[in-house]
Amino acid sequence: MYLREVVPPGPRAAREAEKAARRLGTQLDERRSPRTAATVNQMLDKYFEVLDRDTSTIGTYVGYADNHIRPLIGSVKVGALDGNVFDSFYAELRRCRAHCDRKPRVDHRTGRDHTCDHRCRAHVCRPLAPSSVRQIHFILSGALKRAVRWGWIATNPIDAAEPPTAPKPNPTPPSPDEAARILNEAWKDPDWGLLVWLVMVTGLRRGELCSVRWRDLDLKRGSLTLARSIGQRGQQRWEKDTKSHQQRRLALDDETVALLLAHRGQCEAHAAAVAVALSEDAFVFSRAPDGSTHLLPDSVSQRYAKLVARLGIRTSIHKLRHYSATELIAGGVDIRTVAGRLGHGGGGTTTLRVYTAWVSESDQRASSTLFSRMPARSTTTSRARPESDHPRYPYERVAHAMVEEIDVGHLSVGELLPSLPRLAQQRGVSISTVQRAVKLLEGWGYVEVVAGRGARVLP
């Protein structure tokens, strides 16, 4: 940095120039040495004290600070932070998330007295995820900006730091076949099955799902209004705004409305059995007969994790939001509508960037569209029999059922199949499942996909 000050000519110019030089030198010294001896630990304490964020967000920040920032640079003076300190700090985070001393040791399964078993293993250094390092960078950036405002330092040294680049999102929602298996397993308990079903068709966050009350549902018009969410951190629980701090209304399909009506009848019966009334303020999903208490978000996640573990599927309940977004876009729903249902801002940018997986059915439709514009060639259509009489997946079962209808004449030669949404409604499956079934029929030689019209039964 270069500081300049012009001294006007005159008999006292030399003396005034010396004063100006001392004044500029003091300014340079203040930029290197702060007016306080506060450490990073003291700065973080003050920052968390005045930070205006949600309780869960502050808890996450405190966790990162206690586990990574304080042990490594907590005793460093704020004024001594520079690019070299941050580079060494980030390098250590990338080396080992436990910040070991590089000596051999054993990672025990618990800190209490115990007998070691296979869960107590030799320590292996694992780096902290780039997204976590970026989160730590943003925590320090916010704290140092406050330090500049408080006059502790003159400039923000975080500007000299270089955080890791943001990782590219790679959403991995369950496939339609996995979603069907998950639902079939969940329906063994009707209440739990309805909860999983509702997450799939609405894409609700787990905290939003736990906060739904009967007064939020308009089952006559088929809509759900979301204005709250349940927060949880350890033993703390509280009711808060939604993540986007906005109220949103979601339309519900007829099947979901029918399931909620049946669930309402069961809840009223349970309440009547213990001589209590089910009020409109009661929670839709509750363990209390009168619906006075809500489910805990962590409990919902844990039960779902056990369910998918039994099925051998690696996923989480949050990825059902990815599934909902992917299926909606694959079904032709516009991005803004999908973003509105999921509670995203930015006109759908977040939805496309984070929550939408690559959809093979859409890619197949693209290839079919291109094929329909290719020059015609002379071919002889031959019909192949299905590979197996015992279909394993939902789309195979749909394809076999349609083969039988074609063979017995329920679907005549040259007739167009019903639209994909209508077929999905008739068969009780998703649109993507019907798309895969039609593709299978085309491969067997039973139908021909006509661009702009649909699938036509072949002779």
Image: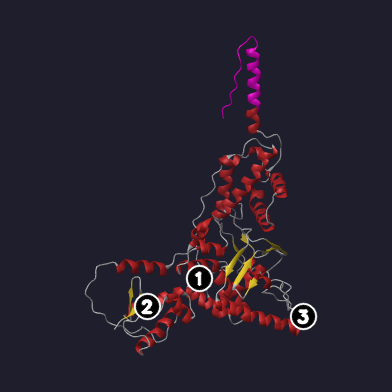
How far apart in space, not on screen, are marks 2 and 1 (Cα)?
21 Å
How far apart in space, not on screen, are marks 2 and 3 (Cα)?
54 Å
Q: Nearer the viewer, mark 2 or mark 3?
A: 3
Disc 1 marks a residue whose amino acid type is Pro
In this view of the protein, which residue sits in the foreground, 226 or 220? 220
Q: Is residue 164 above or below residue 107?
A: above
In this view of the protein, which residue sits in the foreground, 288 or 144? 288
Q: Does any portion of residue 446 appear in the rendered image? A: yes
- Residue 292 x, y percent position in the rendering: 74, 73
**Label 2 Cα neighbours within 10 Å, binned few <14 / some 14-19 / many ≥20:** some
Disc 2 marks a residue whose amino acid type is Leu
Residue at mark 1:
174
2 magenta-colored: yes
Q: To which quarter of the image does residue 342 belong?
A: bottom right
Residue at mark 3:
276
- Residue 232 x, y percent position in the rendering: 68, 64
Q: Nearer the viewer, mark 2 or mark 1?
A: 2
Image quarter (top left, top right, bottom left or bottom right) of the C terminus = bottom left
Point out the tag, 2 or 3, that comes first from the N-terminus.
3
Residue at mark 2:
440
Report the disc number at residue 84.
Answer: none
Q: Which residues are magenta?
A: 1-26
Element type where label 2 sits in the image: helix
Point out the tag, 1 or 3, that comes first from the N-terminus.
1
> Residue at the spot x=53%, y=62% of the render?
339
Point out the tag, 2 or 1, that comes first from the N-terminus.
1
- Residue 404 x, y percent position in the rendering: 38, 88
- Are the residues at dot 2 and dot 3 in contact (C-beta closer than 8 Å)? no
55 magenta-colored: no
Disc 3 marks a residue whose amino acid type is Val
- Residue 81 x, y percent position in the rendering: 62, 40
> Residue at the spot x=57%, y=66% of the render?
318
